[in-house]
């Protein structure tokens, strides 16, 4: 991964990345080295499925370590310097579609921790970008694959 731009995450997500990186570098590397050693002890490496599996796992682990190191190096920890009335990182937002009655709630996060299953919306997604800097009662429109959508901001926390 060759990231050249900064990745924005919460302190919590940054701490998770550091923890995973340390685990991979210490515990996981040791486990893989032991698996490789065991597989080597079985003899002929050319037809040794355990050895090939351990090598593949080692390659995947090293790739993940490299990705995490790059992410950590280019990460900015999200700070919300804005007033709580204005939408920014960490804001919890309730919005309602024009003409609709259903209210949708989201938390604005960095792209690395966006997860729509738990209503965490990336600040660079079309909806997230449209929300940034807005306030309660603002009406805004943003582009979706099915055309423009208009919403009203019901609540900002």
Image (cartoon, rainbow, N blue to C red):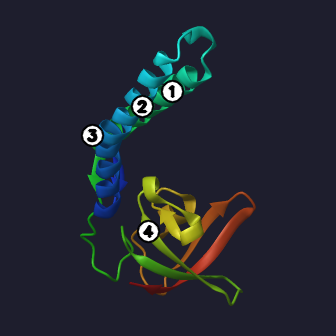
Q: Given the current orientation, which residue lies at the most extreme right position?
A: 146
The reply to whether dot 4 and dot 3 touch (C-beta < 8 Å) is no
Name the spot of residue 91 as percent of width and height, x first: 39, 75
Crowding around mark 3 (Cα neighbors within 10 Å: few <14, some 14 to 19, many 20+) is few
The quadrant in which residue 152 appears is: bottom right
**Residue at 50% across, 67% down:** 120
Label 2 – label 3 distance at C-alpha: 25 Å
Q: Mark 1 sits on what residue? A: 54
- Tag 2, which secondary structure? helix
- For residue 108, which numbered disc appears in the image? 4
Circle nearer the N terminus (2, 3):
2
Label 4 – label 3 distance at C-alpha: 22 Å
**Residue at 24% across, 70% down:** 81
Front in this rendered view, residue 30 or 106: 30
Q: Which of marks 4 and 2 is in front?
A: 2
Residue 71 visible: no
- For residue 32, which numbered disc appears in the image? 2
Q: Nearer the viewer, mark 1 or mark 3?
A: 1
Q: Nearer the viewer, mark 2 or mark 3?
A: 2
- Tag 4, which secondary structure? strand
Label 1 – label 3 distance at C-alpha: 28 Å
Name the spot of residue 58 as percent of width and height, x first: 45, 28
Name the spot of residue 57 as percent of width and height, x first: 50, 31
Residue 146 visible: yes
Name the spot of residue 96 as percent of width and height, x first: 61, 83
Circle nearer the N terminus (4, 2):
2
Whether residue 36 is situated above or below residue 9 in the rendered picture? above
Front in this rendered view, residue 89 or 1: 1
- Tag 1, which secondary structure? helix
Whether residue 74 is situated above or below residue 81 in the rendered picture? above
- Tag 3, which secondary structure? helix
Label 1 – label 4 distance at C-alpha: 39 Å
């Amino acid at each position: 991964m060759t990231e050249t731009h900064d990745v924005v995450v919460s302190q919590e997500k940054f701490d998770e990345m550091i923890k995973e990186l340390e685990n991979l570098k210490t515990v996981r590397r040791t486990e893989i080295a032991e698996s490789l050693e065991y597989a080597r002890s079985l003899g002929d490496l050319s037809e040794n499925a355990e050895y090939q599996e351990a090598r593949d796992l080692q390659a995947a682990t090293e790739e993940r370590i490299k990705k995490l190191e790059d992410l950590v190096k280019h990460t900015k920890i999200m700070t919300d310097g804005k007033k709580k009335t204005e939408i920014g990182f960490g804001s919890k937002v309730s919005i309602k579609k024009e003409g609709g009655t259903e209210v949708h709630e989201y938390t604005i996060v960095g792209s690395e921790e966006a997860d729509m299953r738990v209503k965490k919306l990336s600040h660079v997604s079309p909806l997230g970008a449209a929300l940034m800097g807005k306030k309660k009662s603002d009406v805004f429109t943003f582009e979706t694959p099915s055309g423009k959508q208009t919403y009203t901001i019901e609540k900002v926390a």
